[in-house]
Image (cartoon, rainbow, N blue to C red):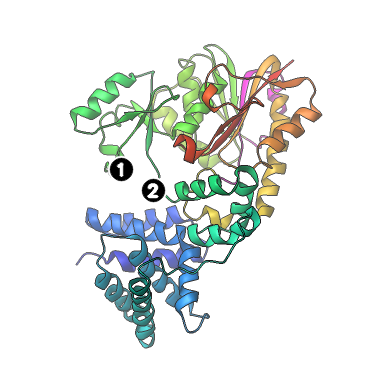
Amino acid sequence: MSPNPRQLAFTALRSIHKGAFADVAVDQALQQAEMSLLDRRLFTELVYGTIRRQRTLDALIDQFARKNNQPPDLRLILQLGLYQLRYLDQIPESAAVDTSVELAKRNKLSGLMGVVNGLLRQYLRTQTILKADPLELPEHSGTCSGAIARLGILHSYPDWIVQTWCDQFGIAETEKLCEWMNRPPQIDLRVNTLKTNIDQVEAAMRAKNIHVDRIPNVPNALRLPPSTGAIQNLPGYTEGWWIVQDSSAQLVGHLVDPQPEEIVADACAAPGGKTLHLAELMHDRGTVWAIDKTASRLKKLQQNVDRLALTSIHTLTCDSRDVPQLKEQCDRVLVDAPCSGLGTLNRHADARWRQTPQSAAGLAQLQQEILTEAATWVKPQGVLVYSTCTLNSIENESVVKQFLAQHPDWSIEVPNQFSALTTSEGWIKVLPHCHNMDGFFMVRLKHG
């Protein structure tokens, strides 16, 4: 008998609420359970979707429940049921209700089966009577501050993230951004130009009836259609023709623009996608220092280096805030800094609940320290690129402005490429709802 995907989703959600990372919990369940492709997809959708929509689902539970102090397991079952009713059109309403009641029975909550049945059916009745969304939202006056709670509940984000975006982009753009970040993540490929070219990969995909799209402004990038199937079964995987990397992340390597025979450093290298790209752009001629303080993460990078037979990459296990041996040794340095990841929330369902204003402030301090140290590695007239995958000005513009104020011998170098993404200040900002890629910030700095 194959495992029940809803039961597995309930178990995974329970472990996530106890501190496990969502992707780890999902991967472990998929490795341990023998499920059909349809069940695997349902399980994955239920876990990621329920985590992503957690605040909205909790608001509905609080709205329809007679008591708001449900046991944690009961609340998880109600979240799963409401997620199916609200967001999964392919699940019949009766199936969503009945399987949720069955979950309560299977997980020693038999006495609360009536609560599950009653709340879910009350949601459906209210939806039918209103002929509209039953979710009650707070009133707002049309101002940015008044809209924060409404957007946070409707689209399921903590208020501080909505406020952060609202301060930068305004109400209307923030709502578009919130909607985009709740979409399923796209899968982009970066063609390995040391082994093939984009025409060959595109032809190989289409020969297998896989339609891929090229991506404007991103050389050698292809986007896969939804539900492509297992990545390792696609043409060119075994041959190392491409790796999975979002288009925004691919832009970073092009902004660094490393040349053959140069010495380049990647200050925060793991898991290694950008490091590999730098080596490819240099035609694997020269030296790329891949630096990270976590040996296990560098080991995974080294496995890819070995698989692709690259000779220019050398790993260095140390804290990038203290690497005196690289002082004035590098032609180009990349600081793709640890960040709050607010530009990639659609890929990391639980990240919106893990980050806080305090953690973002701590990251901004770390980013400043790494950037300051990495600048000492650059030769006179050399290049330093700073990038993050967040949309938070204290980790982006503020870090760069502070660095430039303290280092008058550095300045922003406006890139010739990617003019459509470059602001008047000279940095590149990728906005997901505008550019259909992960949110990214990057800037190229010149020494001397």
Q: Amino acid at mark 2?
A: Pro
| Above or below for 192 versus 430 | above
What residue do we see at 33% from left, 25% from top? Answer: 241
- Quadrant location of the N terminus? bottom left
Within the magenta stretch, is there residue 8?
Answer: no
Mark 2, Cα crowd under 10 Å, few <14 / some 14-19 / many 20+, is some
Query: Magenta residues?
Result: 318-341
The answer to whether one can see residue 420 in this image is: yes
- Quadrant location of the C terminus? top right
What residue do we see at 44% from left, 37% from top? Answer: 436
> Which sits in the foreground, 429 or 330?
429
Q: Quadrant of residue 11?
A: bottom left
In primary-sequence order, the first of circles 1 and 2 is 2
Q: Position of residue 262 (x, y in %)?
A: 57, 14
Q: Position of residue 62 (x, y in %)?
A: 50, 75
* Residue 226 disc label: 1
In the current view of this chain or complex, which residue is farthest to the bottom?
Answer: 111
* Residue 184 disc label: 2
In the rendered structure, are the residues bearing label 1 and label 2 in contact, judged by CB atoms less than 8 Å apart?
yes
> Which sits in the foreground, 361 or 181?
181
Q: Quadrant of residue 95?
A: bottom left
Mark 1, Cα crowd under 10 Å, few <14 / some 14-19 / many 20+, is few
In-image side of 367 versus 387 (left or right): right
> Which sits in the foreground, 4 or 314?
4
Within the magenta stretch, is there residue 321?
Answer: yes
What residue do we see at 72% from left, 27% from top? Answer: 324
> How many numbered marks, from 0 up?
2
Q: Position of residue 116 (x, y in %)?
A: 37, 79
